[in-house]
């Protein structure tokens, strides 16, 4: 009689252990699924903002500019891409004005490169290049430049935080690898952001 009770008691303990183990397993599985989903969501958001080389903060009407480091540009089948952002806030600081702004890209003419610029979309064959043409200009010293300034004007409202992400694409075709006259020649690429205060 005692042996039967002992056997019954043991199977109840085993049953409780199996139930507890199952609950722990299900809980771990749920937590793991949550973290995988959260990480995937984070990774997809982070990818959109990855590789932003420069952040420009427009808090008043002004002209800002920066240069692209072109030292590593050599003839290649793959285009070079550079990301930068233009926004009307910096941390907790926001601009106090409505602003209109546009972008001008200026390059020297030392290398046979082409420039494209994309706004708030990844570079692809279906994306819209906002600087489809350039104008050749000459400065007072006789140096020639390509000026890409066909970009539309964009608006920032002082009471709305906004960030525009741009992708600059530089194409330097592989065919020029055999042209000795371009070897080691520097190319200057300048991006200018011009903003003005808007009254309405």
Image (cartoon, rainbow, N blue to C red):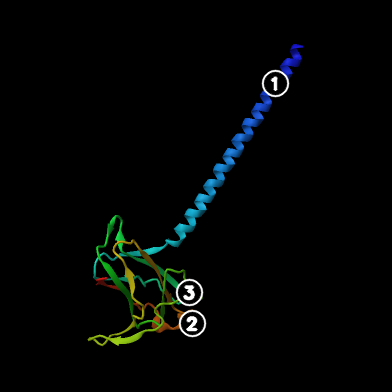
As drawn, the label of residue 56 is none
Who's the residue at 62% across and 31% down the image?
20
**Residue closest to the far top:** 1
Work out whether residue 189 can be spotted: no
Q: Earlier in the sequence, mark 1 or mark 2?
A: 1
Which quadrant of the figure has residue 130? bottom left
Q: Residues within 10 Å of mark 2 (few under 14, many from 20)?
A: few
Q: Position of residue 77 (x, y in %)?
A: 50, 76
Mark 3, secondary structure of its residue: loop
**Residue closest to the far front:** 200
Q: Residues within 10 Å of mark 1 (few under 14, many from 20)?
A: few
Q: Earlier in the sequence, mark 3 or mark 1?
A: 1
Q: Position of residue 43 (x, y in %)?
A: 48, 55
Q: CA distance from mark 3 to mark 1?
A: 69 Å
Mark 1, secondary structure of its residue: helix
Q: Nearer the viewer, mark 1 or mark 2?
A: 1
Quadrant that contains the C terminus: bottom left
13 up-or-down from 153: above or below: above
62 up-or-down from 26: above or below: below
Q: What residue is pinned by disc 2?
A: 175
Which quadrant of the figure has residue 66? bottom left
Q: Is residue 12 left or right of residue 200?
A: right
Q: CA distance from mark 1 to mark 2?
A: 80 Å
Q: Position of residue 193 (x, y in %)?
A: 30, 72
Q: Earlier in the sequence, mark 2 or mark 3?
A: 3
3 or 65: nearer the eye? 3
Q: What residue is pinned by disc 3?
A: 127
Q: Position of residue 143 (x, y in %)?
A: 28, 85
Q: What residue is pinned by disc 1?
A: 10
């Amino acid at each position: 009689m005692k042996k039967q009770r002992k056997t019954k008691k043991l199977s109840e303990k085993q049953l409780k252990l199996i139930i507890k183990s199952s609950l722990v397993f299900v809980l771990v599985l749920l937590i793991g699924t949550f973290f995988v989903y959260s990480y995937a969501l984070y990774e997809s958001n982070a990818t959109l903002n990855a590789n932003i080389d420069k952040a420009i903060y427009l808090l008043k009407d002004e002209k800002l500019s920066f240069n692209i480091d072109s030292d590593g540009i050599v003839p290649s089948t793959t285009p070079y891409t550079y990301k930068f952002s233009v926004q009307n806030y910096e941390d907790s600081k926001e601009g106090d004005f409505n602003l209109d702004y546009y972008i001008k890209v200026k390059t020297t003419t030392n290398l046979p490169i082409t420039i494209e610029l994309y706004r708030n979309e990844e570079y692809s064959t279906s994306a819209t290049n906002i600087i489809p043409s350039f104008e050749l200009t000459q400065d007072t010293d006789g140096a020639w430049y390509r000026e890409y300034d066909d970009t539309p004007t964009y608006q920032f409202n002082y009471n709305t935080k906004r960030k525009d992400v741009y992708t600059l694409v530089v194409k330097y075709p592989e065919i020029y690898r055999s042209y000795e006259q371009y070897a080691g020649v520097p190319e200057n690429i300048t991006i200018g952001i011009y903003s003005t205060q808007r009254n309405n």
